[in-house]
Image: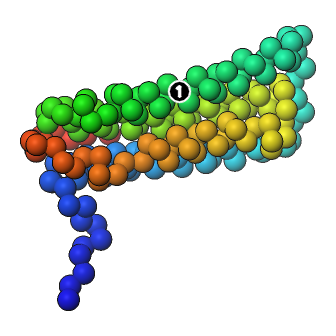
Amino acid sequence: MTRPDPSSDGLEPAASHWLERTRSVVLNVMVVDGLAIAATGLILRRWEGIETDLDRGLLKKLLLGGLFGVFIVALFVLGRLGGRSRLEAPITRGSRYFTSRVAAAVLGWCTLPLGLAYGMLIDPSLGGVAPFWLAAMVLGRLALPRALDLEGFPEPMPEGPEPPR
């Protein structure tokens, strides 16, 4: 009995190429997320908070609202811009899939500067910045491509241009 090739995803060659390229870029963004989280932790551990004349309650609401807004926009990008209905056309399927997944992962990274600002201005404790760190990692995980996303379309993707690098 032979075992199936673990690198085989059962997709047509063009779809498999886009899937692997997208996976590589999203994983790279997640590595940058991890490095940014580590850097944020070191910064907040070593430096004291910044005093400001602005109302801390208002700043807290703005930064948490920004976190919520970025999270919702990233979910919109994943669901609507990279949804099955937008991927129907075989000519644009690969590029739209790549763009929606990478954009969602990058939007996840955008929560990290908000977390640093929250830590510097409001609460430098782990409990204060954890929601920002968690949002970045959750969005990165949701953006990871799966073979299932590119299966079941009636027309195959054409062999064509390389995915953007």
Q: Is residue 151 left or right of residue 25?
A: left
Q: Amino acid at mark 1?
A: Ile
- x, y (%) of residue 105? 48, 38
Residue hosting label 1: 72
- x, y (%) of residue 140? 50, 43
Q: Is residue 28 left or right of residue 37?
A: left
- x, y (%) of residue 21? 31, 48
According to the image, what is the colour scheme of the structure?
A: rainbow
Res. 28 visible in picture: no
Image height of 119 relative to 21, above or below: above
Q: Is residue 24 left or right of residue 149?
A: right
Secondary structure of the residue carrying tag 1 is helix
Query: Relative to the observer, which residue lies in front, 150 or 92?
Result: 150
Image height of 73 relative to 150, above or below: above
What residue lies at 62% left-to-right and 26% top-to-bottom? 68
- x, y (%) of residue 99? 34, 33
Res. 149 visible in picture: yes
Query: Relative to the observer, which residue lies in front, 45 or 10?
Result: 10
Q: Quadrant of the C terminus?
A: top left
Q: Residues within 10 Å of mark 1 (few under 14, many from 20)?
A: few
Residue 161 sits in which quadrant?
top left
Q: Quadrant of the N terminus?
A: bottom left
Callout count: 1
Q: Is residue 133 left or right of residue 163?
A: right
What residue lies at 23% left-to-right and 39% top-to-bottom? 94
What residue lies at 34% left-to-right and 28% top-to-bottom? 81
What residue lies at 16% left-to-right and 43% top-to-bottom? 153
